[in-house]
Structure formats: structure tokens, C-alpha cells
Amino acid sequence: MLQLLRRIDQKVDRLGERVDDLTARIGSVESQVASLRGDFVRLEHRQDRFDERPQRIEKRLDLVEA
């Protein structure tokens, strides 16, 4: 009976280690996703500025009414 309890204890310890490892890996994935979201927001902002640029050029050259 004591050996059975020791084996169960060892298995629980290994499971705990695996859970700790998976928790760390999930945290890493979450950080990477947050970073990608920030990159996406910056790209959207740049795209908005590119859309505004031809309008400013047209205004400067008096190609459109102000």
C-alpha cells in the first residue's frame, strides 16, 4: 500500500511539473499575441497616414477644392 501511495505521489509531482511548464508556455504565447496586436495597430495607423498623404498632396497642388 505504501508503494502505491509513493507511485501516486510521484505521478502527481510529474503532473505538477507539466502544469507549471504549460503555464509558462501559455504565458509566452499570450505575450507574443499581445506583441502582434500592437504591431497590427501600428500598421493600421501607418496605413491611415498613407491614405491621408495623397489628399494633402492634392490640396497643396490645388488639384481639389479645399
Image (cartoon, rainbow, N blue to C red):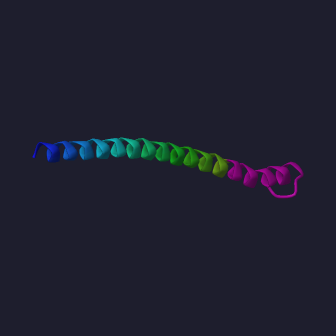
Percent from the top left, x then y, of residue 49? 72, 49
For residue 58: magenta? Answer: yes
Closest to the observer: 10 or 57? 10
Give the side of residue 60 with respect to residue 45, left or right. Answer: right
Percent from the top left, x then y, of residue 4? 15, 48
Closest to the observer: 55 or 5? 5
Vertical placement of 12 versus 51: above or below? above
Task: Determine the residue positioned at 40% across, 43% down.
Answer: 21
Task: Determine the residue positioned at 53% across, 45% down.
Answer: 32
Percent from the top left, x then y, of residue 31? 50, 42
Task: Determine the residue positioned at 34% across, 45% down.
Answer: 19
For residue 6: magenta? Answer: no
Task: Determine the residue positioned at 36% across, 45% down.
Answer: 18
Percent from the top left, x then y, of residue 9? 21, 42
Most common secondary structure along the magenta stretch? helix
Q: How many numbered discs?
A: 0
Check the image and name the residue furthest to the bottom. 64
Give the image quarter of residue 38.
top right
Residue bounds of the magenta highlight: 46-66
